[in-house]
Structures are given as C-alpha cells and as structure tokens.
Amino acid sequence: MAKIIAMMNQKGGVGKTTSSVNLAACLAVAEKRTLLIDLDPQGNGSLSIGLAKETFKEKNIYHALIGQIDLKEAIYESELPFFHICPSDNNLSGAEIELVSLFARESKLKNAFKSVDKDYDYIIIDCPPSLGLLTVNALNAAHSYIVPMQTEYLAMEGLAQLLNTVRLIRTSLNPNLELDGILLTMYDSRSGLHKQVATEIKTHFGDTVFKTIIPRNVKLAECPSFGKPIILYDIESKGSEAYLALAKEIILKERFKGNTEASKESGS
Ligand code: ADP
Ligand code: MG
C-alpha cells in the first residue's frame, strides 16, 4: 500500500510544487515507486517535469476526480524510472464547484486512489494554495502532510487557519492524518532574518521540523523551465543534495516507525 503525503500550505509561493516534484523524483531515484498528483489547477508541477499540455488535455486528474475515467488512465510516465505523474490543467479550477453537488465530494480523491494504491510506494500530492475542497480531498486521502514554510517574515501567519482545517478533517473524515513535518524552504544561511525565523519555527514545532532544510538555490528555480526535476538537471547542485536528503529522511522515518510498531506487536 502506498504512503500518501499531501504537500500543503494555503499560502502561494512557499515551495509546495518545487518540493512535491523534487521530493517525488528523489524518492524515485531510491527506487521507490512514486506517483506525483498535481492537484493545483495552475498545473505547474505537470509542466515542470516536461509533460506537454496537449498530451494530457483529455485525461488528467480533473477527469478522474469527477469520475469520468479511472485514475490509472490519467497517469503518465516521466523521464525518470519509478516516477509517474497524474497531471492537471486549468479545468481543475472548475472541479471545486462541480464537486460541491456530488455525493461524497470530500472523498473523490481517496476513492480514486483505490485502483492505483498497490502500484506505488509513495503518492505525493501537490496541493493548491487554498484550503478549499481540493485540499480537503487531499487531506482526506492522505496518511500524512508536509507543510513547506519559507523562512521569511510572517512565515507562521495563516498557520492557525491551516491547523484548524486539519483538526476538522481529523475529527470528521480522517482521524489518522498525521503531520510528517514542517519543511523549511528557500533558506539563505547568510540572512539574519532567515536564521531568526528558522529558530522561531523550530522553537514552536520542535521535532516536527524536518532536519533537512531546503536552501535557496537558483538551480531549483531554473529546472522547471527545462522540464526536469533537479536531480536530472544538476545532480551536483545544493538543491539536489537537499531533496535527496529529504527523501532519505522520509524513507528512514517510515522504516523506524515500522520497526517500533513491529516491536510493540511482538511485545519487545
Ligand atoms: P508554491 O507551489 O507553494 O506556490 P513554488 O514551489 O511554485 O511554490 O515556488 C515559488 C517560486 O519559488 C517558484 O518560482 C520556484 O521556482 C521558486 N523556488 C522554490 N523553491 C526554491 C528554492 N529552494 N530556491 C530558489 N527558488 C525556489
Ligand atoms: Mg504550487
């Protein structure tokens, strides 16, 4: 069964798409079968791994969500083995309204995953910058979520609202939803402000902040225009290093959790 992770933060420009694409690619490098779900109508994730819009116009996440096709039919291969993507385009922006009238509207994505769940080790969902029905679908379908945060002034603004949404999802839809971690992004170690904000976030969240910090790295901003994840664009870059470290942190966390659960069951 796939581990399903939602990359969420209702703020735009905090690194959700960059982190979704590059974490997914790095998990695939470790030969984890990985599916990236682009759940943002802007479709940046889809374009940044080099899929041409024309190829997925008729079959993408929108058609799967409204039940026109099976999710399997909306999955495309990428240049990288083990790395598949279910793309989106701007017709997804209409889905939020179309879904409202449908039965079990919060569970469309969760139900769509049933046909692909066993084909993957990880499913990473790139959420839109809102807490609307698409993000609710992502959090309902996910086992856990990651919150990317820029180490800038007002980084934690909006956080109460985000946590409130998560609380509502946990009480009404998905009681097992866990926080995987807060991911610090676009960090500039030379900036006093960045250092200060990073310290504040760590004080506030303690161990739930990922050890891996994503540095500001121009290669990460460049690689989408070449249609490649960072690992294929420049393996020597700081960006590659950081997302590989994040993939490792996530894989090891899962393994550690598996071990402690197994030892609990055996009574040791
Ligand atoms: P979101 O999906 O949260 O809106 P993006 O991942 O699209 O955020 O990032 C916003 C912008 O910042 C994009 O132009 C992206 O290329 C750039 N960016 C993201 N992460 C980094 C980074 N670590 N270093 C440099 N630029 C980055
Ligand atoms: Mg985005």
Image: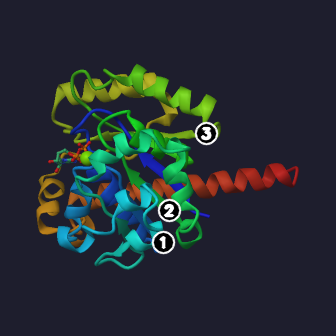
Q: Quadrant of residue 171?
A: top right
Which amino acid, by three-letter code, is at mark 3? Answer: Asn
Check if mark 2's residue and mark 1's residue have beta carbons within 8 Å.
Answer: yes
Which amino acid, by three-letter code, is at mark 1? Answer: Arg
Q: Is label 1 within 8 A of ligand 2 (CB to nearest ligand atom)?
A: no
Kindly identify which numbered label has been placed on residue 174. Answer: 3
Q: Residues within 10 Å of mark 1 (few under 14, many from 20)?
A: many
Dot 1 falls on a residue whose secondary structure is: loop
Which residue was labeled with disc 2?
Answer: 122
**Is label 3 or label 2 in front?**
3
Closer to the N terminus: mark 2 or mark 1? 1
Residue at screen point 43% across, 23% down: 203
Which residue was labeled with disc 1?
Answer: 33
Quarter of the image with the N terminus in it: bottom right
Residue lying farthest to the right in this orientation: 267
Which amino acid, by three-letter code, is at mark 2? Answer: Tyr
**Relative horizontal placement of residue 165, taking residue 239 as reference (left or right):** right
Dot 2 falls on a residue whose secondary structure is: strand
**Relative horizontal placement of residue 225, taking residue 173 as reference (left or right):** left
Instruction: Report the front residue among 190 and 110.
Output: 110
Distance, label 3 to label 2, CA atoms, is 18 Å
Instruction: Report the front residue among 231 and 135.
Output: 135
Closer to the N terminus: mark 3 or mark 1? 1
Residue 133 location, x and y as percent?
41, 38
